[in-house]
Structure formats: C-alpha cells, structure tokens
Image: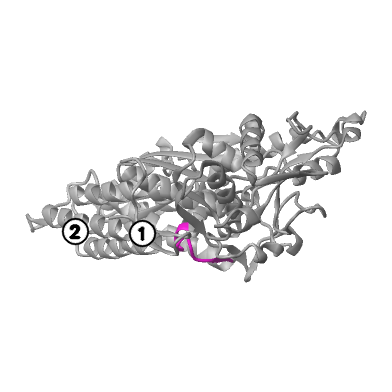
Amino acid sequence: MLKVYNTLSQKKEIFKPRKARKVNLFVCGPTVYDFSHIGHARTYIVFDMIAKYLKQKGYRVYYLQNITDVDDKIINRAIEEKIFWKDLSRKFEKEYLKDMKALNITSVTKYARATDHIREIISQIERLLKKGYAYQIKDGIYYDISKFKDYGKLSKRTALMAEDAVSRIDEAKEKRNKGDFCLWKFVRPEWQKSGKKFLRIPSWPSPWGAGRPGWHIEDTAITEKYFGSQYDIHGGARDLIFPHHEAEICQMEAISGKKPMVKYWLHTGFLTVKGQKMAKSLGNFITIKDFLKKHSARHYTKQSYGVGARILRFFVLKTHYRSPIDYSEKEIGQVKSQLERIDEFLDKLQSRIGTNVTTNNTNRISEISAQIREYLRAFEKAMDDDFNTPRAMALVFHLISRGNYLFDKEKITPADAREILKFLRKIDKVFNFIFFGERVALKIPSFIKKMVKEREEARKKGDWKLADEIRRKIQWMGYKIEDTKEGPKIKKI
C-alpha cells in the first residue's frame, strides 16, 4: 500500500487518486531565462522516478509541467543581451528540453507554455475580480489575500506573515496588503513604441488593458484547462511552498469554491553546496549542461554513453527526495565508485549467461528465484513508503554482495544470472541508472581475436614463452587479457 508525505497535512497518507487508477500530476517547470542547474535537475529526476513508479504500479499517469516563458527575469536578460524576449525564452526552453532528454526524463506527458494559455489566464482573473478576490490599481490586477480565509494552510503562515513574501511583479505601493500578489501587469504604451525590437515589452490585450500575466496565475490556468479545478498531485521544490504554491491554492479554490485544489502536495529538499543553496551570486552554480560535459565518458571508463546523466541520477536518488543533499566532488567520486561496483557485477552476470556452468545443487534455480521474489517485495515495500529510494538502493547493493559471494562459491548458474538481471531491469525502469544508456559492447578487431586464440593454443601445449609473447603484443596494440574460469576476456586499455 503506497503512502506519501503530504505537505498540506504534514504526515504520510495512503495514496488514493481521485479517479480509480488515473493520476493527474503537475510539477512546476522552469523559468527559461538561463541554463537549468543541478538543483533543478534534482526535482525533475525525482518526479520522473515518482511518475515511473506509479506507472509500474499500474496507474495511468498524466504528468503535466508548465514552462514560464514570460517573466521579468526573461525580459531583463533579453534587454541585457539585446535580443527579443521570445528569442531568449525559446533558446533556453530548447536547452532545458535537451537537458531533460539527456537525463532520460521521459515521463512528462505535456510541457505547457504560459504564453500559450493567455486566454485561460484572463478567464481566471475575470472570475477572481467578479467574486471580489482581486482588485485593480494603477499598475495591474492584484489578489487580495485578506479575502481568502484559508490563506497559509500549506505553508502554515498567516496573512500577516506574508509581508516577507518573495514574489514576482508585486512591488506596487498601492497594494492593500503587503502579501498581495500580481495577477496581471499592465504595460505602459510608451514601452511598446521603441524602434528596437529587443526593447519591446511583451503584452497581450485584456479587458483591463494590455499587459502580461503574473507568475502564480499561469499554473492554475494551465492545470484547470487539463485537469479541472481539482487533481491528485502537485510537486515542486520546497522553496516554492511559499509564496508560489500558497498563491495557487488562493486562486483556484477561490474561483471554484472546491477544496482541496490538490489532494497531495509533494516537495523535494534543497540541493546545497557546502551548506549553501545553489546560486549564481555565490559562485556555486553548476548547470546541468556543464555537469554532463565534465563527467563525460573520458572521465569514467566503465560507460560509453550517458555517463554524466547516469552519475547525476544516482547521486539524486541515493538520498530521500525530501531530505537535503550537499553536493561535493568527493561525493561524486563515491558515486562513481558505487557505479563501478554495479558494473562489475553486471559484467559477471552477462559473462555467466551462455556458459555451461552447473552446480551440484539441483535446487539452485528455485532458491535464487525465491530470493529474487523477496528482494522484489522488499523493493516495493521501500518505494511504497513515500518513495524511499535509499532503502531500495540498499537492496541493490545487498544483492550485489550476496551475488558476489555466490560467484566466489561457484553457485551462480546462467539461469540464476538471467533471473537476477530480470529483477535489476525491472527496478531500473524506475531508477534509470543501472542500465542507463546500455553499455555499448566493445568491438574487438578480428586480428586481436585471432591472436587470443593462438595464445590459448600455445597455453594448451605448454608453450608459455609464446603465450607471454602474444600477450605482450596484444597489450602493445591497446588491449589486455584477463584469464578467468570461463575463458579469456579481452578489454580495451
């Protein structure tokens, strides 16, 4: 029975979707004014894992993610670089999607741009005005938080505590309450008359005048279109709880009159560097692109494709999604060592398949099958406990230790190896780091294979001098031979 920690109730709850086996999941996406960093990657890897596990349990998951493609940060960056705001946002949206593809984040059903939903945004603002939850001042339309009685129920803050809200486009002096946030920002006509395209501020017509949406309103407009006024899961990083997610609740529940807007709120912990939140101003900002480039194949010999992405997925998932992670190169080094241990075990399993190794114990296959069933039950128990990936991963390494012991005792048959690999592939449909990218088989040149065969013939005849000479020649050509009980193995140096 799956249980999830709900930020709204601050306790674990049995997961029961609103409609049988269908799950509607929304996660706050990026503001596309720059490259995404590995702190962002943490959230998106986590919810990719959650969506994939829900699917493995038989749920039909619709995973929706917004893309904030109009915002003050985008506009200011575009003016600095002297390019049109839309060109900038499209550029970084493309980069973001490239990052997601590189990380094998494949569970998202739809990415929805804010600017593709202006009509829905205007509709929501009109209804908020009509119901008395919003008001107009000189620079735009604002939400009056004093009108919403349940304000603060997610973050456990009162309206008076909202004075320290870090929001966007909400600095107007005419606001009724300091915590009031902008729904629609008016654009001054003179800003649109510039002959320089990069100075033109984005705006759309509305019943109140040309302008652009505030930050919070886009999410509820998008989710209402695809999910209606209530849905199952809303996810994001914990720094979005206040004021962003609090604002979403105010908007949607005021419009619909239905509670709760979201049944389960899930939030990821921070990714820090030496205890500090990742930020450009602190010089500890590591983009996903730079991380993947740094930890490419030439830095890590066991994998020839997707190496950096594999490392990052493992690094993120080895910690529980609600706990903080502190990034360091030392920790990444440990991740690499752990992945090498996994790879060595996979090599042993693959090598055993196709051999004629047998054991004296005729019950060997059934024993392994029984053990794998126990591992599978333990995996599901861990994941059903609020997606406890550290406990689930501990099972993988326990299996490796047990498997290596049985290899040493010559008690792993080809059938056993296939059974173990089947289990690992099943759980890796959720994790995506064990077989990430499928290691590309090394193509050994035919003349090297011929030399290895000649060496084996020399060894059988007891001509050790010739065998050693052939080994040296093979090594000089960039390959090495490892003599095993199953026969010689060739590896690229």
Q: Which residue is mark 2?
A: 371
Closer to us: 236 or 360: 236
| Residue under the image location 76 percent in, 46 percent down | 73
Q: Residue 367 versus residue 147: which sits nearer the camera?
A: 147
Disc 2, SS: helix
Queried whether the magenta region covers residue 194, the answer comes back as no
| Range drawn in magenta | 317-327
Residue 445, percent across and down? 43, 37
Q: CA distance from mark 1 to mark 2?
A: 30 Å
For image coordinates 54% across by 57% down, the residue present is 150
Q: Earlier in the sequence, mark 1 or mark 2?
A: 1
Numbered label attached to residue 469? none
x and y, in percent, of residue 110 in the image: 51, 34
Q: Is residue 131 above or below residue 424?
A: above
Q: Which residue is mark 1?
A: 13
Residue 224's x, y, as percent? 52, 37
Which quadrant is the N terminus positioned in? bottom left
Residue 198 seen anywhere in this rendered image of the structure: yes
Count residues near mark 1 (Cα–Cα under 10 Å), then give few for <14, some for 14-19, many for 20+.
some
| Point 63% across, 41% down: residue | 128
Callout 2 environment at 10 Å: few (<14), some (14 to 19), or many (20+)? Answer: some
In the rendered structure, does residue 319 fall within the stretch colored magenta? yes
Residue 93: percent from left, percent from top: 65, 38
Q: Is residue 260 left or right of residue 346?
A: right
Q: Is residue 295 visible?
A: no
What amino acid is at disc 2?
Gln
